Image (tube, rainbow, N blue to C red):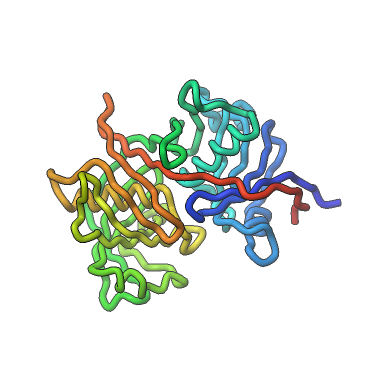
Amino acid sequence: MPQTIAFTKGHGTGNDFVIVPDDDGAIDLSDAQVAALCDRRFGIGGDGILRVVRSGALPEGAATPDAEWFMDYRNADGSAAEMCGNGIRVYAKYLVETGRATIDDEPLRIGTRAGTKTLTRSELGFEVDLGLFAVAPDEVVVRARGLDVARPGQGIDVGNPHVVVALSSVAELDDLDLTVQPQLHPLPAAGANIEFVVPAEPLVQAGVGTIRMRVFERGVGETLSCGTGVAASALAVRHWAGAGAPDRWSVEVPGGTLGVRVARGADGDHVLLSGPAALVFSGEVALA
């Protein structure tokens, strides 16, 4: 008999996930099973899987001792990813709604492959401190269907790798065909999510920078939103704008609007991402 597991479907600005509760680490999903669950025609459908597991139930060396819960995030093709900015807000929503954790009295800490992340409530829903970020010194050349010539891309690391490309107009952004994976040269060793951005005119309004973005996620394809990609896009435009650039950003994606801010910490500048999280429905499914 096939194994039957419980699940909940959730999303953050249209970036959707299959949440699998596995508190004690008893479920071992293969890449093929993850892909089957995420299949939009034959499965539940999602951009990835969020396995809810206690850090203490993980194999030695994988646990995060400073966080009770670990977000085991897998892309829709089954590959493991370091972090997911929309996913971790949905994960936090699930922990709080199911009584596994609280967030109102103190910040909620969640373990990831990119380290432990801290979440609080915000006016948009939840805000996650993604931690330190890095701007790559060298450009990457990006080719995409719908662009007449290759464009320079800015590498940004926010716990997972991104390449951000600036476009000249909303029309150019809308004309991109992201059913085909853009090509990077040189190709980063671990691949990268690829964001295409258009700054607003004017870029800064009431002290807040505004941009629009579309994204091709590695291991998934185009998604309605990518939280870490939103953060990377704001950081890239902030980098290009120079010393006078604001620390607060509003980023419009096909699935909605997310907020980004840069805050100074004792160890350097941190990037924080805020936005909504929703749980849609729950059920049971037999594993392939």
Q: Nearer the viewer, residue 102 or 82?
A: 102
User: Could you say where residue 48 lies in the image, as x and y percent from the top left?
Assistant: 56, 52
User: Could you say where residue 198 lies in the image, as x and y percent from the top left?
Assistant: 27, 62
Which residue corresponds to the image point at 32% horizontal and 39% vertical from the top-left? 271
User: Could you say where residue 97 lies in the image, as x and y percent from the top left?
Assistant: 61, 35
Q: Which of 124 and 232 is in front in this view?
A: 124
Q: Residue farthest to the right?
A: 1
Quadrant holding the C terminus? bottom right
Which residue corresponds to the image point at 31% horizontal and 53% vertical from the top-left? 233
In this image, 198 relative to 34: left or right? left
Res. 191 image quadrant: bottom left
Q: Residue farthest to the left?
A: 243
In this image, 44 relative to 90: left or right? right
In this image, 57 relative to 246: left or right? right
Q: Is residue 145 above or below residue 52?
A: below
User: Could you say where residue 273 lies in the image, as x and y percent from the top left?
Assistant: 38, 42
Using the rendered image of the protein, determine whether residue 93 is visible from the camera's viewpoint: yes
Which residue corresponds to the image point at 34% horizontal and 47% vertical from the top-left? 231
Res. 133 image quadrant: top left
Which residue corresponds to the image point at 43% horizontal and 61% vertical from the top-left? 254
* Total numbered badges shown on the rendered structure: 0
Q: Is residue 173 above or below residue 3?
A: below
In this image, 182 relative to 165: left or right? right
Res. 146 image quadrant: bottom left
Using the rendered image of the protein, determine whether residue 84 is visible from the camera's viewpoint: no
